[in-house]
Image (cartoon, rainbow, N blue to C red):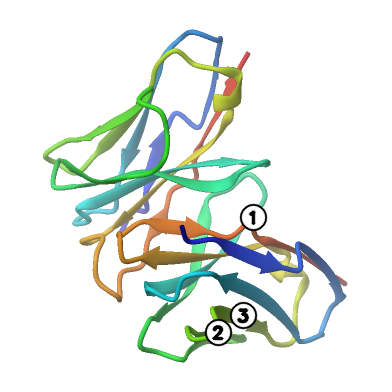
Amino acid sequence: KQEVTQIPAALSVPEGENLVLNCSFTDSAIYNLQWFRQDPGKGLTSLLLIQSSQREQTSGRLNASLDKSSGRSTLYIAASQPGDSATYLCALRDYGQNFVFGPGTRLSVLP
Amino acid sequence: KAGVTQTPRYLIKTRGQQVTLSCSPISGHRSVSWYQQTPGQGLQFLFEYFSETQRNKGNFPGRFSGRQFSNSRSEMNVSTLELGDSALYLCASSSYGTGRQETQYFGPGTRLLVL
């Protein structure tokens, strides 16, 4: 059974810092991995989608990498801003076509 | 293009009642997935519908059911509500629901409180 973990569970950084969020998974048989952000009480917003054959994806200040062999993905946020404060979730689509989500990392960027 | 919409946004029910939640996907999307989000269990996959057929199902009891209509709108039903069913229920849509380039688009959710 696929299990997804995210470290750290919570993170607080001053504005302007670069930071890395981690996502680990136990089964490398995945179609893709997606990073989302969720604002309090709201739905999820897709940030980046990495296909299983890809190593990384970039969008603006965000860069996500995928290493299937080690069961890891990282989300790098450059020059963090208070507006980046949210919970960040990674999710995998496994070969059974089910989505498995990590528990999330709650990020606070302090002005 | 309008996003995924869910109704109602908030709902209060009592134990033993049943509830129906609705989701309208992005126009042209044929896959709709449902998730339950709770503080203790996080985000858990309930089921996925594609072209009016349930394609995948998560590990939830039979009290949780759903359906999809010919216009791709979907409903989920929870019968005999329990206190533990209190959660944020999220719906997501995508074009086909398969393939490596598919991105899911989420609605704002329905917050259900069971008293």
Front residue of this view, candidates B109 and A32: A32
Question: Which of the two marks, 2 or 3, is nearer to us in this view?
Answer: 2
Question: Which of the two marks, 1 or 3, is nearer to us in this view?
Answer: 3
Q: Which residue is mark 1?
A: A39
Left or right, B112 with reference to A96: right
What's the chain of the residue with tag 1? A
* B10 is higher (above) or lower (below) than A96: above
**Residue found at the very far front of the displayed protein:** A1
Residue B48's x, y, as percent?
29, 47
Q: Which residue is mark 3?
A: A75
Q: Do the residues at discs 2 and 3 belong to one chain?
A: yes
For the residue labelled by badge 1, is the local secondary structure a helix, a strand or a loop?
Answer: loop
Q: Which residue is mark 2?
A: A70
Please report the residue visible at 30 percent of the width from the left and 59 percent of the height from the top. A96
Q: Which amino acid, mark 1?
A: Asp
The Cα atoms of the two marked residues, 2 and 3, are separated by 15 Å
Front residue of this view, candidates A110 and A105: A105
* A87 is higher (above) or lower (below) than B17: below
Quadrant for residue B15, please give it.
Answer: top right
Q: If you read the primary sequence from the N terminus, does the residue marked by circle 2 or circle 3 appear first? A: 2
What's the chain of the residue with tag 2? A
Residue B51's x, y, as percent?
13, 47
Please report the residue visible at 57 percent of the width from the left and 80 percent of the height from the top. A72
For the residue labelled by badge 3, is the local secondary structure a helix, a strand or a loop?
Answer: strand
Quadrant for residue A6, please give it.
Answer: bottom right
What's the chain of the residue with tag 3? A
The Cα atoms of the two marked residues, 1 and 3, are separated by 17 Å
C-beta proximity under 8 Å, tags 1 and 3: no
